[in-house]
């Protein structure tokens, strides 16, 4: 409960900060202070200090899995603020509002990571989505940003409709008249056509929110059109949060009837991996490439949904953390650039060795090369599937796709290191460089000692 | 402690090297590599059951993976080769000027770390980590300091090997879930085949073998190799062909044949046939090559094919031959690369047709080259003779295949072919009329003489007295054969 209330309050504070604080830099500082408080609150929640004893009538259920994810998400947001705080404030005229919206999204994430009832899931997802529609269009004078915002809103509204319909079906199919996850997929209800219709509708709408193929068509345009700083947030923390909700929904509600829906997820996984990776190969802009790469990474995350075992639960936490950190790092560099094409990276290594080196680590991590967190994350996902003993074809297919992904990730590395060219001027501060190094170090540490993070799932406080 | 030092010294030295000045980096790298050589010699001299040769500590507990390294068996001789190769490479290319030399030498040391790690690892996940760690620095080395078409060539190399390793990862995971208490330890892997039925072993074999086949390389997975060797800077080519390809052979010897014995027997004939095709094919192409680097590259494919053939014959003589030949081939091929490098540096060309008559001007270089060439075609009294002789007798006497005579005859043909192209090369490059390019040739410098002389002495000493190598590898051969149920 700590994080939900704190983030909502912080959102309100940030909204009014514009009245008292005139300088962008002080608003950024306030936001950073706020996120640190929020992270502290989430950590205290995990350690058993609950400051807001609200009786949610079992609508929300706080377990270590959700709370740990909150910490991961807030830590990633902290890194995001530290790297790109000024750039967020510089999107438009109302810097306080952008931060306020981001805090509201975080509030939605905290609900989505701990819901125990379909209503709470719906509310959480909507609290995430609505501020994002606004953030996408926050670069008001840019036509592409407007287009992206409208597109996102229309498609998002449509998928929300699907979700509501699904929830209604599930509610109707049950004999208890309950929205609680525990009552959905059990007893004689399980597997009836009405219930399966609801489940599939819900699955489609969640797949839309995490941009899994074939529900991904909005992603490249929205990610490309939105201001780059906002894309960074949407493609990482938000996506991870919705994914956690997705996993939670299926573990708690439909975990016992895996056989009925597993094949759908398997097909979605294969399609997502294929479309994400193959389309990314043909991109000419690094920003669009990262949009498709985020689809491809979702393909790997879907393995967790396919299996829902312990390894998957552990792995998805690691995956979201590593994927978010790596992508935030890359986007942070991208935000500073003007030319997003691959050629824009030519000769970067000579001019900005630290930026090039850290970008290489992030790219290696996304490609899943050992010694980086990305490898261990993919390892957990693959191991989770192998542990079940089925779907070996999907694992082989996924790794073939991972080989394809090396192609487009390494194009950036090749441009930075092996191609000559005059690098574009980047406006960097020493703090930015230091932050990048810290982020790269965390990515590597998670690659060598993943249990440092995963072990936290098993620390029990009184 | 010894294995930790072997991995730790080059790793630390490499990381420190990034921050050094360009001029100091070279000496620093040489110093570190000599230190590694010293440690590995010490390790080999220690008694077999010494506690210093083992190290194991908690790493990823819940996954069943430990940081377990040990200097034993097959790994020993390859560690020695790796430790020996790097100082030789550094000294022979001492005069080469690199842009950003500190990065170059640091990456070289990191690749040595990866290689040593592969040969020392006693845990499958750790093995996989090092397997990739050896690849990444080499990719950067070849792409940054290589020839004109380096980016495309090395990228092909990377994609090939990366795909191979990912398939191996699936194989490793599959075996891991069939070990008794979910462990990555080598000993657990050796037990796992009892739980894996023969049909499963049959496809599992290919998942793992793919990685090793790409690395060796075995036909038809070899197409990355000539391009990469040609485009890489000479020092990197030496690492690649002298040490790195041995990773493939080593992988089969330690992580495949004893882990999946039934799969290995099942596919023995198929793999052997591929080896034979590759050997003849590579030899025929080598005969038509005009580029020295490509010639040596193709000759290396032929030699690696023979080693792989001998492994799948699963006889004592064959395996013994492979172990020794891995070491000897490493020495010979590095020697050949050094000569090619010296020629290219002096005459600015690698085209055989543009060279000629160097012998009169550079007698020392010529003598060295002739000896190394003779060793490469396995003439008696050179080191390669013993290995190849054992491998041939192993293949001929093999009980694992009914085509042993065919294989032996075909393999013998490639030896003749190798004599044809190697001697032809010597004749056209070193003898014959002097042309405009070669008339001002000078002989090699002291450091180059030292290195080549050292290699030639090794070639002859091992050729005359191979006993120490036999003693070093006997234990590994016995235990391997026992695990494959050939010997009690």
Image (tube, rainbow, N blue to C red):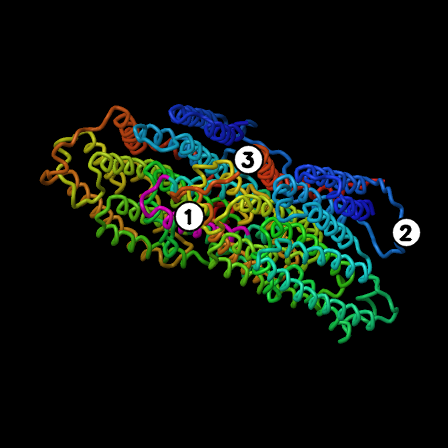
Q: Secondary structure at mark 3?
A: strand
Measure how far apart labels 2 and 3 are at the Cα level: 54 Å
Which region of the structure is painted magenta? B145-169
User: Which of these two is toward me, B302 or A349?
Assistant: A349
Q: Nearer the viewer, mark 2 or mark 1?
A: 2
Residue B332 visible in the shown view: yes
Q: Residue at x 78, y 59 (%)?
A: A123
Q: Position of residue A291 (x, y in %)?
A: 56, 56
Q: Secondary structure at mark 1?
A: helix
Q: Is residue B113 above or below residue A314?
A: above
Q: Quadrant of the N terminus of chain B?
A: top right
The disc label shown at residue B215, or none: 1
Measure how far apart labels 2 and 1 are at the Cα level: 61 Å
Label 3: chain letter:
B
Badge 2, how many Cα within 10 Å: few under 14, some, many 20+?
Answer: few
Measure how far apart labels 1 and 3 are at the Cα level: 22 Å
Badge 1, how many Cα within 10 Å: few under 14, some, many 20+?
Answer: many
Q: Secondary structure at mark 2?
A: loop
Label 2: chain letter:
A
Badge 3, how many Cα within 10 Å: few under 14, some, many 20+?
Answer: many
Specify whether B327 is left or right of B184.
left
Q: Nearer the viewer, mark 2 or mark 3?
A: 2
Report if residue B150 lies within the magenta region.
yes
Q: Which residue is mark 3?
A: B69
Q: Position of residue B268 (x, y in %)?
A: 43, 56
Report if residue A401 lies within the magenta region.
no
């Amino acid at each position: 409960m700590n994080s939900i209330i704190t983030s909502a309050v912080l959102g309100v504070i940030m909204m009014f900060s514009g009245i008292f604080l005139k300088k962008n830099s002080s608003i950024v500082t306030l936001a950073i202070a706020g996120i640190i408080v929020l992270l502290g609150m989430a950590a205290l929640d995990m350690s058993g200090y609950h400051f807001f004893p609200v009786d949610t009538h079992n609508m929300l259920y706080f377990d270590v899995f959700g709370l740990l994810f909150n910490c991961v998400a807030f830590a990633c947001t902290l890194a995001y603020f530290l790297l790109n705080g000024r750039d967020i404030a510089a999107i438009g005229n109302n810097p306080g509002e952008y931060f306020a919206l981001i805090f509201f999204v975080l509030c939605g994430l905290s609900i989505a990571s701990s819901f125990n009832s379909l209503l709470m899931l719906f509310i959480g997802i909507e609290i995430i989505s609505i501020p994002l529609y606004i953030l996408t269009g926050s670069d008001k004078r840019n036509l592409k940003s407007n287009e992206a915002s409208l597109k996102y809103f229309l498609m998002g509204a449509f998928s929300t409709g699907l979700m509501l319909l699904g929830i209604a079906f599930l509610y109707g199919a049950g004999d208890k008249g309950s929205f609680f996850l525990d009552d959905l997929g059990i007893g004689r209800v399980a597997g009836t056509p009405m219930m399966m219709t609801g489940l599939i509708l819900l699955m489609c709408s969640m797949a839309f929110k995490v941009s899994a193929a074939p529900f991904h068509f909005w992603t490249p345009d929205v990610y490309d059109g939105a201001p780059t700083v906002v894309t960074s947030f949407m493609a990482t923390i938000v996506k991870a949060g919705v994914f956690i909700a997705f996993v939670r929904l299926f573990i708690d509600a439909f975990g016992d009837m895996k056989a009925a829906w597993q094949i759908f997820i398997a097909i979605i996984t294969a399609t997502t991996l294929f479309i994400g990776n193959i389309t990314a190969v043909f991109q000419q802009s690094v920003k669009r490439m990262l949009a498709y790469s985020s689809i491809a990474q979702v393909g790997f995350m879907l393995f967790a949904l396919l299996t829902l075992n312990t390894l998957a639960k552990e792995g998805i936490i690691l995956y979201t953390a590593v994927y978010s950190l790596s992508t935030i790092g890359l986007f942070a560099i991208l935000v500073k650039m003007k030319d997003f094409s691959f050629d824009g990276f030519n000769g970067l290594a000579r001019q900005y060795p630290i930026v090039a080196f850290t970008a290489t680590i992030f790219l290696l991590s996304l490609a899943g090369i050992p010694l980086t967190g990305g490898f261990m994350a993919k390892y957990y996902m693959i191991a989770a599937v192998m542990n079940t003993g089925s779907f070996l074809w999907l694992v082989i297919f996924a790794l073939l796709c991972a080989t394809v992904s090396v192609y487009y990730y390494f194009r950036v590395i090749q441009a930075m290191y092996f191609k000559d060219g005059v690098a574009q001027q980047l406006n960097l501060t020493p703090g930015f460089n230091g932050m990048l190094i810290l982020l790269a170090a965390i990515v590597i540490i998670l690659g060598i000692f993943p249990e440092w993070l995963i072990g936290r799932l098993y620390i029990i406080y009184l | 402690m010894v294995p930790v030092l072997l991995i730790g010294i080059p790793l630390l030295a490499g990381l420190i090297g990034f921050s050094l000045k360009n001029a100091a980096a070279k000496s620093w790298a040489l110093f570190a590599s000599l230190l590694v050589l010293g440690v590995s010699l010490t390790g080999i001299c220690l008694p077999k059951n010494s506690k210093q040769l083992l190290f194991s500590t908690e790493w990823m507990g819940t996954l069943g993976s430990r940081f377990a390294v040990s200097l034993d068996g097959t790994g020993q001789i390859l560690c020695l080769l790796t430790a020996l190769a790097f100082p030789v490479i550094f000294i022979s290319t001492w005069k080469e000027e690199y842009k950003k030399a500190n990065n170059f030498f640091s990456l070289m040391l990191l690749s040595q770390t990866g290689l040593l790690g592969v040969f020392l690892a006693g845990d499958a996940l750790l093995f996989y980590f090092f397997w990739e760690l050896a690849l990444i620095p080499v990719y950067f080395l070849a792409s940054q300091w290589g020839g004109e078409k380096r980016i495309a060539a090395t990228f092909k190399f990377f994609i090939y090997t990366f795909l191979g390793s990912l398939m191996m990862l699936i194989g490793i995971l599959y075996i891991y879930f069939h070990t008794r208490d979910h462990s990555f330890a080598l000993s657990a892997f050796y037990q796992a085949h009892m739980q894996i039925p023969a049909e499963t072993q049959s496809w599992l074999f290919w998942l793992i073998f793919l990685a090793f086949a790409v690395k060796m390389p075995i036909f038809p997975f070899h197409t990355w190799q000539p391009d990469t060797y040609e485009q890489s800077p000479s020092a990197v080519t030496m690492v690649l062909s002298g040490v790195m390809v041995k990773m493939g052979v080593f992988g089969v010897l330690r992580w495949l044949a004893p882990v999946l014995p039934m799969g290995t027997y099942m596919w023995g004939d198929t793999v052997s046939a591929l080896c034979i095709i590759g050997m003849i094919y590579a030899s025929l192409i080598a005969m038509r090559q005009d580029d020295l680097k490509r010639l040596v590259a193709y000759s290396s494919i032929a030699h690696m094919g023979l080693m792989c053939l001998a492994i799948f014959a699963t006889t004592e003589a064959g395996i013994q031959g492979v172990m020794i030949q891995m070491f000897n081939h490493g020495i010979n091929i590095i020697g050949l690369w050094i000569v090619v490098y010296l020629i290219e540096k002096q005459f600015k060309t690698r085209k055989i047709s543009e060279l000629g008559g160097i012998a009169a001007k550079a007698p020392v270089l010529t003598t060295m080259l002739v000896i190394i060439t003779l060793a490469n075609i396995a003439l008696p009294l050179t080191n390669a003779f013993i290995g190849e002789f054992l491998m041939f007798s192993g293949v001929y006497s093999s009980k694992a295949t009914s085509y042993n005579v065919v294989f032996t005859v075909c393999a013998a043909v490639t030896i003749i072919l190798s004599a044809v192209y190697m001697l032809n090369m010597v004749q056209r490059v070193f003898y014959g009329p002097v042309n405009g390019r070669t008339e001002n040739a000078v002989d090699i410098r002291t450091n180059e003489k030292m290195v080549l002389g050292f290699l030639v002495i090794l070639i002859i000493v091992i050729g005359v007295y191979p006993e120490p190598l036999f003693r070093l590898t006997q234990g590994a051969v016995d235990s391997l054969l026992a695990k494959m149920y050939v010997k009690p």
